[in-house]
Amino acid sequence: MPAEVESWLRRRTSATAEWPLGALIEAKAATSVSVVLPARDERETVGEIVEAIRHELDRVVDEVVVIDSRSRDDTAEVASRAGAKVFAQDDILPHLAPLDGKGEALWKSLAVTSGDVLVFVDADIRNFQTSLVTGLLGPLLTDPAIAYAKGCYDRPLRGAPTGGGRVTELVARPLINLHWPQLAGFVQPLAGEYAGRRSALERVPFITGYGVELGLLVDLLELAGLDALAQVDLGSREHSHQSTEALGGMAAQIMLAAWSRLERQGKIHTSHEPAVRLAQFHRTEAGYEAFTRDVSIDERPPMLTIRA
């Protein structure tokens, strides 16, 4: 590991226990904080998460916003009853053609939140603890040089204490180590829990699909430099796990996201839009049956350009 990264790990990695609520309340001062949950069909968990944040963190979190991403269940109603401000993804900036994906919800949240600091939290977390939020807020509320804080944690899988995060280990980490070794110290580069200053987040584009986390890391590194990035050990995070077929599509989007950044940085050159036709297989009584799915990525420009 490069010496720069080892130094960064020592200085910019902390644990959530280092950021007690009382200290954050004192450090918050006039800084406003928004917590954003992108949610699609998460009625089983979103209400519990919203209630916990509102009841336990009311002195440090100014608003809890749920971006409902075309849920087919009553996620929006559950979140609203729990005390969140709820916005339908496609109702935000309606003059823009709607796009798909988690990154679209995160990007649009910048248009309907007011916080100087935004904390992004997945809405499918089981056994949610508010220390996840306070941990991410710690570096940002106490050090003005920090622009972005990324969570890291253990990933239980089917009862085992580790084993989750398969796309991270098999796809994202090799890409990062090969092309952006400055980011090699991030334990969970695809983690869905992170926080950033609005002043930074509004200046970078957002990939609308699963590549949003990788895209933000690469773009914020380029915008602010490694020393403006931090990570916080949040302990353990348990959530629903996707099928192998779904992970294949996610992995393809991560690779396309990396491809787009490599092209933008002049490291590769291509004459076509990033896209891939992904072949997958099901076993049937007659043998293997092939099917294909087209995987591509879209991107939103920096929110500052839209506000202007």
Image (cartoon, rainbow, N blue to C red):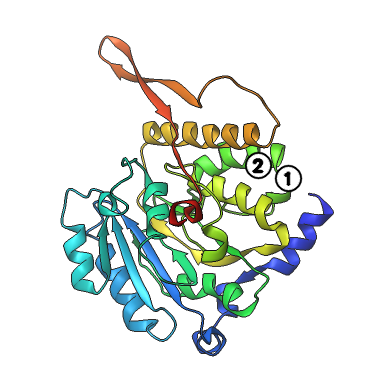
Cα separation between marks 1 and 2: 6 Å
Is residue 173 shown above or below 11? above
* Left/right of residue 44 with respect to residue 169 in the rendered view: left
Query: Image quadrant of residue 239?
Result: bottom left
The answer to whether mark 1 and mark 2 are in CB contact below 8 A is yes
Query: Image quadrant of residue 114?
Result: bottom left
Which residue: 51% across, 37% down?
254
Question: Residue 176, labelled with which disc?
Answer: 2
Badge 1 amino acid: Pro
Q: Secondary structure at mark 2?
A: helix
Badge 2 amino acid: Ile
* Left/right of residue 243 with respect to residue 187 in the rendered view: left
Query: Mark 1 or mark 2, which has the lower sequence index?
Result: 2
Is residue 119 shown above or below 92? below
Residue pushed farthest top?
A: 286
Spot occupied by residue 306 in the image (x, y as percentages of width and height): 44, 52
Spot occupied by residue 144 in the image (x, y as percentages of width and height): 65, 75
Question: Residue 39, labelled with which disc?
Answer: none
Spot occupied by residue 162 in the image (x, y as percentages of width and height): 51, 53
Which residue: 70% across, 38% down?
179
Is residue 122 shown above or below 22? above
Query: Image quadrant of residue 6?
Result: bottom right
* Left/right of residue 42 with respect to residue 12 in the rendered view: left
Which residue: 38% across, 54% down?
108
The residue under label 1 is 181
Other residues around mark 1 within 10 Å, as few (<14) / some (14–19) / many (≥20): some
Other residues around mark 2 within 10 Å, as few (<14) / some (14–19) / many (≥20): many
Q: Is residue 152 in sight in this rendering?
A: no
Q: Is residue 200 in sight in this rendering?
A: yes
Give the number of callouts.
2
Viewer-closest of 270 and 279: 270
